[in-house]
Image (cartoon, rainbow, N blue to C red):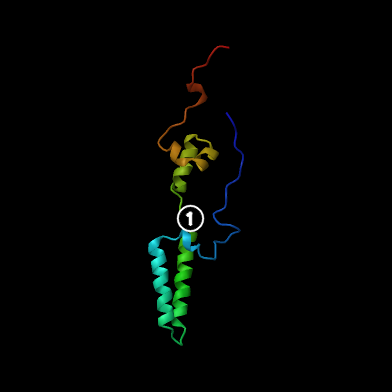
Amino acid sequence: MGCVCGRPSSAFDDGQCRTTPPPAAKLSAAVRREEEARKQQQQHARTGSGREEALERRRAMMAMAAACQVRSPVPRAVEGEQVAAGWPPWLVAVAPEAVRGWVPRRAESFEKLDK
């Protein structure tokens, strides 16, 4: 049996989320159509007040903020319960779904073998 040594990864690179939009090849078809329609609207309906540009910047900021949110599939309270039940903290941090619903056995519960 081996051992893994590491540190938790950060949620964001360098403390910030990516500021550039993802390449067009990685976007879904619906998002591409929406962005193309938005660009066409901007080209056809330019106003002198700059309101369209402000709205577009705000939409982009909201989309970037939504993309930066990290959602954990297992709440922290459940991880705490698993650690309190006797699971090693490193195991709960790496694979909380794998030990959900299981109860760890103590060393005394195993049969001792003669050498």
**Circle 1 Cα neighbour tier, 10 Å, few/some/many (<14 / 14–19 / ≥20):** few
Give the residue type at disc 1.
Val
For residue 85, side relative to residue 4 (left or right) = left
Q: Quadrant of the N terminus?
A: top right
Q: Position of residue 106 (x, y in %)?
A: 49, 26
Residue under the point 39% across and 67% down: 33
Q: Position of residue 5 (x, y in %)?
A: 61, 39
Q: Quadrant of the C terminus?
A: top right
Which residue, as the protein is rendered here, is positioned at the far top? 114
Residue under the point 57% across and 61% down: 16
Which residue, as the protein is rendered here, is positioned at the far front? 25
Q: Quadrant of residue 99?
A: top left
Residue under the point 55% across and 11% down: 114
Give the secondary structure at mark 1. loop
Given residues 30 and 14, the one toward you in this image is 30
Residue under the point 60% across and 34% down: 3
Judge whether 6 appears above or below 115 on screen. Answer: below
Judge whether 100 appears above or below 74 on screen. Answer: above
For residue 53, side relative to residue 3 (left or right) = left
Q: Position of residue 32 (x, y in %)?
A: 42, 65
Q: Position of residue 78 (x, y in %)?
A: 44, 44
Judge whether 19 appears above or below 90 on screen. Answer: below
Which residue is label 1 attached to? 70
Given residues 114 and 80, the one toward you in this image is 114
